[in-house]
Image: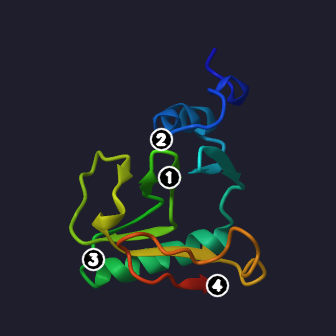
Amino acid sequence: MGMTLAELPGQPLTEDDLGDVGRLLADTGWRYELDNGRLLLMAPMKSWHADVSRRICNLLISQGRPSYQEQGVRLSHRKVRYPDVSAFWERPDPDAELHDPSDLAIVVEVVHRQRRGRPGCEAAPVRGCGHPRVLDR
């Protein structure tokens, strides 16, 4: 039998622990990020959210930008985000699990209008990625 969430190393977690988290949450639909060593769990994505993310990603691809959904961005050893859509300056290593912010030209977070302005939904600048923009439903 595999590890449980309760068996993860104590806080603070680091990017090195995310492999175990990913295996534990595989096939559950739950998404996660690492914020200053704290594991943040997010509910499975709603269909409207997936649709908007896919459309934005496809738009960026049609403009010739290498773009992907849910790519890991390493902001520090204890802070890893998985934005909805990431457009890269050039095609990334297909086997990379985490990317440096300077590799990204555009980062998109899709947020429902009812969540705008709530804690955790602010558009935070990502070092090397220019000014943030929030798109809502």
Name the element at disc 1: strand
Disc 2 designates what residue? Answer: 15
Q: Which residue is mark 1?
A: 80
Q: Earlier in the sequence, mark 3 or mark 1?
A: 3
Mark 3 or mark 2, whichever is nearer to me:
2
- Label 3 CA crowd tier, 10 Å (few <14, some 14–19, many 20+): some
**Crowding at mark 2 (Cα within 10 Å: few <14, some 14-19, many 20+):** some
What is the distance, in whole Å, between disc 3 and disc 2 at their CAs?
A: 27 Å
3 or 1: mark nearer the eye: 1
Measured Cα–Cα span from mark 4 to mark 1: 23 Å
**First of labels 4, 1 by sequence position:** 1
Q: Which mark is residue 136?
A: 4
- Residue position for label 3: 65
Q: Are marks 3 and 2 in contact (CB under 8 Å)?
A: no
- Counting from the top left corner in percent of width and height, residue 108 is at 49, 75
Cα gap from disc 3 to disc 1, whole angstroms: 23 Å
Residue 110 appears at what percent x and percent y? 59, 76
